[in-house]
Image (spheres, rainbow, N blue to C red):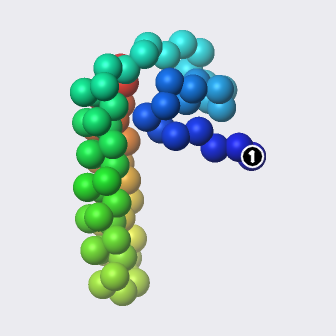
Amino acid sequence: MASVDSASDARTVNNTMRHAYRILSDAEKASMQAIKDEGLKFHDLIAGMGNSREISLAKTKIEEAVMWGVKHITA
């Protein structure tokens, strides 16, 4: 499966659920990238602490926070 950068205007090609996207401004693309970068940094920090139910929940919540932040930008 080919991948598309999340900040690319071509991100619509591999999404079956959302049928229309608006073009994001450069500032919106930068914000989306920053949210994902910071989310990944936090996710990696938590993941480095070992494995437990609590760690699993924390990683899931970080992923969810990133999703909602990006959704706000792309809505």
Residue at (33% x, 31% y) in the render = 29
For this view, does 12 lie left or right of residue 67?
A: right
Q: Which residue lies furthest to the bottom in this view?
A: 50
What is the secondary structure assignment of the residue under circle 1? loop
Q: Position of residue 30 (x, y in %)?
A: 28, 36
Q: Would you name the residue on which mark 1 appears?
A: 1
Drawn side of residue 51 relative to residue 12, left or right: left
Relative horizontal placement of residue 51, taking residue 20 as reference (left or right): left
What residue is rendered at 49% in x and 16% in y? Answer: 21
Please state which of residues 55 and 73 is positioned toward the viewer in this rendering: 73
Q: Mark 1: few, some, or many residues within 10 Å (few <14, many ≥20)?
A: few
Q: Residue furthest right?
A: 1
- Nearer-the-camera pick, 26 or 61: 26
Q: Where is residue 14 in the image (x, y as percent from the top left)?
A: 65, 32
Query: Does the image show residue 68?
Result: no
Quadrant including the C terminus: top left
Tell me the kind of residue under disc 1: Met
Residue found 71% across the figure and 43% down from its top = 2
At horizontal 39% and vertical 71% (from top left) the residue drawn is 56
x and y percentages locating residue 51 in the rendered image: 40, 84
Image position of 54 (left or right of 19)? left
Q: Where is residue 1 in the image (x, y as percent from the top left)?
A: 74, 46
Image quadrant of residue 73?
Answer: top left
